[in-house]
Amino acid sequence: MTVESPTVPNARFARAALLGVVFVCAACGLAYELALISLGSFLIGNTATQASIVLAVMVFAMGVGSLAAKPLQRHAAAAFAIIELALALLGGLSVLALYAAFAYLSIYTSALIVVAFVLGLLIGAEIPLLMVLLQRIRKQEAGSAVADMFAADYIGALIGGLCFPFLLLPFFGQLRGALVVGLVNAAAGAFLIFVVFGRVLSRPKLIALGTATLAVVAALIAGLVMSGWFEVTARQALYRDPVVAAERTAYQDIVITERRTALGRDTRLFLNGDLQFSSIDEYRYHEALVHPVMSALPARGGSVLVLGGGDGLALREVLTYPNLGPTTLVELDPEMVRLGRTDPRLTSLNRGSMNDPRANIVTADAFSWLRDNQSRFDVIIIDMPDPDETATAKLYSAEFYAMVRGHLATGGRVVVQSGSPYFAPQSFWCIGSTLAEAGFQTTPYHVDVPSFGDWGFYLAGFQRPSLTMTAPRETRFLTPAVLAAAGVFPADRQPRPTPPSTLMDPRILRYAQSEWTAY
């Protein structure tokens, strides 16, 4: 038996509206969580750690918030309105505030924990208050009320979880996406209070809550208006040189900077804040990466596979060989491919290699592409970002290298960019042991790239490869003598016995994160 509440004139409408608000609030709450995780993965890397921090802190805080809401149940409608406004304001501005903490104050992790805790506290206080309001509309058995409430909550979380990657990020980006969610959150709370429970609250309370709602909405709209200027300003604070191009994609943050130096124009590419090349000395890196492995190219013409290298600079060196057969480049990010093809700063450096008809450019995840493709190649060049993030660590695993080995033709060679044997020796030698675990014979070598320091590579094949080169034109840096010297490691950088990295135990990720944070 149920009892209609005399304070709510249309109980059926009110109940449906309240469950709808539960649905919207759950979607907004999960969107806030995903926004914090996504931002951390872009700024800091290591998605697993960022997700663990956010989820653990927020779930704990939700429990605290549920307990803290008990004294507020006597004034459930007004308390819920205040909590929703605070949640909309903090959640909507959370990404902007954390980006500022990262760019200007260098206190990102501490700020993340505080923001996640307060958001969790507010989200946790929602359900107890909404449960009280639901029972005021129509009394029912506790089990049935809980079932209705959590059904709406979980379905809303599903929609919020799907909207974040497929709607908010592609159409609004991280900053604006969080602000839009905040506006939706504020609208849902205001609807429930002013439309459904407007007669329950006194006139002074309604005026106060109305004023607060307008202030929160105005702050969020101001954030939307200023978000473009703020993002440009905050991004520039992270880089020494002027930012001339920037794209936040579904996969990474791409930034190009440029300045005039005594050595000429210095164009730099950064992915998620990590330097990928400087135009002043990138030829050293790319000549050392490409020409030793290209000595395996058959005189009659051979096939080449480039994994990564969406800037087209490695491909530029590959395309200098006249005996080139089918050439394929696999790059994950279509925006990086677009920049490599159209940005005048990149096209002048890569000499139009990304538009060369001899090269087949494929936009795909290298791991998945290797699993689905059956072709074999005489030369495979692996030019991936450093393994300091969860997403890239799999590309330095024994399983990945085993798939690479399955695509290598008899007598073929593989080269892997392997980081710095000086700054990150464990990471460097781990790549060698991981290649060996996959069945490769390897030869390590290293060269000096001023922008990076001492930088290393692994040449690999079915048999141990020798360091030779047969470049078709005169190179600016690499010569046979320089290459021979590159195979010599000083006494303080001799090989270390390091276990291989696998998908289930990504040691390379732990090594890279611990070593590079020291510099």
Image (cartoon, helix red, strand yellow):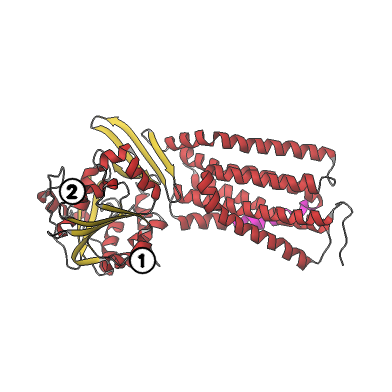
Q: Tell me the residue at 39%/35% (across/down).
A: 243
Query: Mark 2 — residue?
Result: 320
Is 67 included in the stretch rendered in magenta? yes
Query: As rendered, which of 144 and 102 lies closer to the eye?
Result: 144
Query: Dot 1 surroundings within 10 Å: few (below 14), some, or many (20 or more)?
Result: few
Q: Which residues are magenta?
A: 58-73
Query: What kind of residue is marked 2?
Result: Thr
98 in the magenta segment: no
> At numbered mark 2, what does the secondary structure look like: helix, strand or loop?
loop
Residue 164 visible here? yes
- Work out whether residue 67 can be spotted: no
- Outermost residue toward the front in this view: 357
Q: Which mark is residue 372?
A: 1
Circles 2 and 1: CB distance less than 8 Å? no
Q: Position of residue 257 (x, y in %)?
A: 35, 36
- Depth check: 106 or 88 in front? 88
- Label drawn at residue 298: none
Q: Secondary structure at mark 1?
A: helix
Which of the 4 image quadrants contains residue 384?
Answer: bottom left
The percent position of residue 125, horizontal first and vertical second, equals 70, 53
* Residue 362 image offset from top left, x and y in percent: 34, 55
Along the line of sight, the residue nearer the viewer: 447 or 379? 379
Task: Give the dominant element type of the magenta stretch: helix, strand or loop.
Answer: helix
Could you tell me how many numbered marks the image carries? Answer: 2
Residue furthest out toward the left: 481
Q: CA distance from mark 2 to mark 1?
A: 29 Å
Q: Earlier in the sequence, mark 2 or mark 1?
A: 2
Residue type at mark 1: give it.
Asp
Instruction: Residue 372: give x, y in percent of width and height.
Output: 36, 66
Q: Up-down: is 284 above or below 158?
A: above
Give the left or right position of residue 192, taking residue 484 as reference.
Answer: right
